Amino acid sequence: MATIATMTGEQFDALSYEEGRRWELLGGELIIVSSPTPEHQDIVFNLLAALKQYLRTRGGGRAHQDIEFALSEEDRLRPDVCVLLGDRADFDPGKVPIRHAPNIAAEVISPSERAGDTRRKTVIYLRAGVQEVWQIYPATREVLVYAGSVRRELQLSEDLTTDLLPGWRLAVSSLFA
Protein backbone atom coordinates (compact mmCIF):
# COMPACT_ATOMS: atom_id res chain seq x y z
CA MET A 1 0.00 0.00 0.00
CA ALA A 2 1.23 3.45 -0.87
CA THR A 3 0.00 6.78 0.50
CA ILE A 4 -0.71 9.27 -2.26
CA ALA A 5 -2.64 12.08 -0.51
CA THR A 6 -4.40 13.13 2.66
CA MET A 7 -8.09 13.97 2.78
CA THR A 8 -11.22 13.85 4.89
CA GLY A 9 -13.83 11.15 4.76
CA GLU A 10 -16.19 13.59 3.05
CA GLN A 11 -13.63 14.23 0.30
CA PHE A 12 -13.05 10.49 -0.05
CA ASP A 13 -16.80 9.84 -0.29
CA ALA A 14 -17.04 12.43 -3.10
CA LEU A 15 -14.70 10.39 -5.32
CA SER A 16 -16.58 8.51 -8.01
CA TYR A 17 -16.86 4.75 -7.60
CA GLU A 18 -14.50 4.10 -10.49
CA GLU A 19 -11.90 6.47 -9.10
CA GLY A 20 -12.05 5.12 -5.57
CA ARG A 21 -12.63 1.43 -5.91
CA ARG A 22 -9.08 0.25 -5.07
CA TRP A 23 -8.36 2.88 -2.44
CA GLU A 24 -8.84 3.09 1.30
CA LEU A 25 -8.67 6.02 3.67
CA LEU A 26 -6.50 5.14 6.66
CA GLY A 27 -6.17 7.87 9.27
CA GLY A 28 -6.90 10.51 6.65
CA GLU A 29 -4.27 9.12 4.25
CA LEU A 30 -5.43 8.00 0.81
CA ILE A 31 -3.94 4.53 0.35
CA ILE A 32 -3.67 2.67 -2.94
CA VAL A 33 -4.63 -0.96 -2.35
CA SER A 34 -2.70 -3.39 -4.53
CA SER A 35 -4.60 -5.74 -6.80
CA PRO A 36 -5.19 -9.13 -5.21
CA THR A 37 -3.29 -12.19 -6.37
CA PRO A 38 -5.06 -15.42 -7.35
CA GLU A 39 -3.89 -16.94 -4.04
CA HIS A 40 -5.44 -14.01 -2.15
CA GLN A 41 -8.73 -14.43 -4.01
CA ASP A 42 -8.78 -18.19 -3.38
CA ILE A 43 -8.46 -17.56 0.37
CA VAL A 44 -11.22 -14.94 0.26
CA PHE A 45 -13.47 -17.33 -1.67
CA ASN A 46 -12.84 -20.23 0.74
CA LEU A 47 -13.62 -18.10 3.79
CA LEU A 48 -16.63 -16.39 2.23
CA ALA A 49 -18.13 -19.69 1.03
CA ALA A 50 -17.88 -21.21 4.52
CA LEU A 51 -19.41 -18.13 6.16
CA LYS A 52 -22.24 -17.84 3.63
CA GLN A 53 -23.12 -21.52 4.00
CA TYR A 54 -23.36 -21.10 7.78
CA LEU A 55 -25.42 -17.90 7.53
CA ARG A 56 -27.81 -19.44 4.96
CA THR A 57 -28.64 -22.27 7.33
CA ARG A 58 -28.69 -20.21 10.54
CA GLY A 59 -29.96 -16.85 9.23
CA GLY A 60 -29.54 -13.55 10.99
CA GLY A 61 -26.60 -12.16 9.09
CA ARG A 62 -24.68 -11.41 5.94
CA ALA A 63 -21.15 -12.08 4.71
CA HIS A 64 -19.58 -10.00 1.94
CA GLN A 65 -16.24 -9.31 0.31
CA ASP A 66 -14.58 -5.97 -0.43
CA ILE A 67 -17.35 -3.70 0.91
CA GLU A 68 -16.43 -0.16 1.96
CA PHE A 69 -17.16 0.92 5.54
CA ALA A 70 -17.12 4.49 6.89
CA LEU A 71 -15.66 3.77 10.33
CA SER A 72 -14.83 7.37 11.25
CA GLU A 73 -14.33 10.74 9.58
CA GLU A 74 -10.79 9.71 8.62
CA ASP A 75 -11.23 6.00 7.97
CA ARG A 76 -12.84 4.23 5.01
CA LEU A 77 -11.77 0.59 4.99
CA ARG A 78 -12.66 -2.37 2.79
CA PRO A 79 -12.09 -5.66 4.58
CA ASP A 80 -11.48 -8.59 2.27
CA VAL A 81 -14.36 -10.40 4.00
CA CYS A 82 -16.84 -9.05 6.53
CA VAL A 83 -19.68 -10.47 8.59
CA LEU A 84 -22.65 -8.40 9.70
CA LEU A 85 -25.02 -9.89 12.27
CA GLY A 86 -28.34 -8.84 13.79
CA ASP A 87 -29.07 -5.11 13.43
CA ARG A 88 -25.73 -4.57 11.68
CA ALA A 89 -26.98 -6.72 8.78
CA ASP A 90 -29.81 -4.23 8.20
CA PHE A 91 -28.49 -1.73 5.64
CA ASP A 92 -29.24 -0.59 2.10
CA PRO A 93 -27.35 -3.10 -0.11
CA GLY A 94 -27.34 -0.60 -2.97
CA LYS A 95 -25.30 2.04 -1.12
CA VAL A 96 -21.72 2.37 0.02
CA PRO A 97 -20.06 3.15 2.26
CA ILE A 98 -21.84 1.30 5.02
CA ARG A 99 -21.88 3.72 7.93
CA HIS A 100 -21.40 1.26 10.77
CA ALA A 101 -18.84 -1.39 11.61
CA PRO A 102 -19.19 -5.06 10.71
CA ASN A 103 -19.06 -7.63 13.49
CA ILE A 104 -16.10 -9.40 11.88
CA ALA A 105 -13.50 -7.95 9.50
CA ALA A 106 -11.09 -10.37 7.82
CA GLU A 107 -7.99 -9.24 5.95
CA VAL A 108 -5.72 -11.42 3.83
CA ILE A 109 -2.27 -9.94 4.45
CA SER A 110 -0.07 -9.74 1.37
CA PRO A 111 3.73 -9.56 1.56
CA SER A 112 3.59 -6.00 0.21
CA GLU A 113 1.56 -4.73 3.19
CA ARG A 114 3.50 -2.86 5.83
CA ALA A 115 3.25 -4.22 9.37
CA GLY A 116 2.45 -0.73 10.65
CA ASP A 117 -0.53 -0.44 8.31
CA THR A 118 -1.95 -3.81 9.38
CA ARG A 119 -1.61 -2.81 13.05
CA ARG A 120 -3.26 0.57 12.39
CA LYS A 121 -6.13 -1.09 10.56
CA THR A 122 -6.69 -3.53 13.41
CA VAL A 123 -6.82 -0.69 15.95
CA ILE A 124 -9.20 1.30 13.72
CA TYR A 125 -11.49 -1.70 13.27
CA LEU A 126 -11.64 -2.46 16.99
CA ARG A 127 -12.16 1.19 18.01
CA ALA A 128 -15.00 1.47 15.49
CA GLY A 129 -16.84 -1.45 17.09
CA VAL A 130 -15.68 -4.46 15.07
CA GLN A 131 -15.88 -7.35 17.51
CA GLU A 132 -13.25 -9.54 15.83
CA VAL A 133 -10.49 -8.88 13.31
CA TRP A 134 -9.05 -11.86 11.48
CA GLN A 135 -5.66 -11.44 9.80
CA ILE A 136 -4.87 -14.27 7.40
CA TYR A 137 -1.21 -14.71 6.42
CA PRO A 138 -0.72 -16.81 3.27
CA ALA A 139 3.09 -16.70 3.55
CA THR A 140 3.12 -18.36 6.99
CA ARG A 141 -0.23 -20.17 6.70
CA GLU A 142 -1.49 -18.77 9.98
CA VAL A 143 -4.41 -16.68 11.21
CA LEU A 144 -4.32 -14.03 13.93
CA VAL A 145 -7.62 -13.28 15.65
CA TYR A 146 -8.08 -10.05 17.59
CA ALA A 147 -11.09 -9.67 19.89
CA GLY A 148 -10.74 -6.58 22.05
CA SER A 149 -7.39 -6.92 23.81
CA VAL A 150 -7.23 -10.70 23.27
CA ARG A 151 -5.04 -12.07 20.46
CA ARG A 152 -5.14 -15.70 19.29
CA GLU A 153 -2.65 -17.20 16.86
CA LEU A 154 -3.94 -20.17 14.86
CA GLN A 155 -1.70 -22.58 13.01
CA LEU A 156 -2.46 -24.70 9.96
CA SER A 157 -3.61 -27.70 12.05
CA GLU A 158 -6.11 -25.67 14.11
CA ASP A 159 -9.70 -24.54 13.56
CA LEU A 160 -10.96 -20.99 13.25
CA THR A 161 -13.99 -20.52 15.52
CA THR A 162 -15.82 -17.55 16.97
CA ASP A 163 -18.40 -17.07 19.70
CA LEU A 164 -20.17 -14.70 17.29
CA LEU A 165 -21.13 -17.68 15.07
CA PRO A 166 -22.11 -20.52 17.44
CA GLY A 167 -21.15 -23.91 16.04
CA TRP A 168 -19.23 -22.47 13.08
CA ARG A 169 -15.82 -24.03 12.56
CA LEU A 170 -13.35 -23.81 9.70
CA ALA A 171 -10.05 -25.66 9.48
CA VAL A 172 -7.29 -23.10 8.95
CA SER A 173 -5.82 -25.49 6.37
CA SER A 174 -9.00 -25.20 4.27
CA LEU A 175 -8.38 -21.48 3.80
CA PHE A 176 -5.25 -22.34 1.83
CA ALA A 177 -6.66 -25.35 -0.09
Image (spheres, helix red, strand yellow):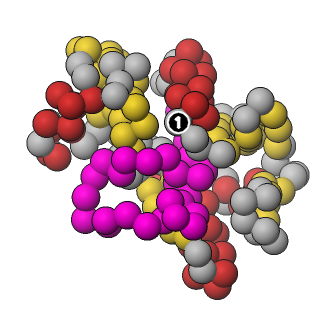
Residue 144 place in picture, x, y as percent: 73, 37
- Residue 168 falls inside the magenta stretch: no
Residue 134 % position (x, y): 65, 43
The spot of residue 145 in percent (x, y) is 73, 41
Residue sticking out furthest to the front = 87
The amino acid at mark 1 is Ala
What residue is rendered at 83% in x and 43% in y?
Answer: 155
Q: Secondary structure at mark 1?
A: loop
Q: Nearer the viewer, residue 64 or 136?
A: 64
- Residue 79 place in picture, x, y as percent: 47, 44
Determine crowd level at label 1: few under 14, some 14-19, many 20+ residues with C-alpha closer than 10 A.
some
Q: Which residues are magenta?
A: 82-110
- Mark yes or no: residue 108 visible: no
Location of mark 1 (residue): 128
The residue drawn where x is 65% and y is 45% is 131
Q: Is residue 74 above or below residue 142?
A: above
Position of the C terminus, as image quadrant, is bottom right
Residue sitting at x 13%, y 36%: 14
Q: Is residue 21 left or right of residue 139?
A: left
Q: Is residue 122 left or right of residue 19?
A: right
Question: Does the rendering let one see residue 159?
Answer: yes
Please tell me which residue is depicted at 35% across the width and 24% down the height of the picture: 74
Which quadrant of the structure image shows residue 65? bottom left
* 99 in the magenta segment: yes
The mark tally for this picture is 1
Looking at the image, the residue that sits furthest to the bottom is: 57
The image quarter containing residue 150 is: top right
Q: Is residue 51 left or right of residue 29?
A: right
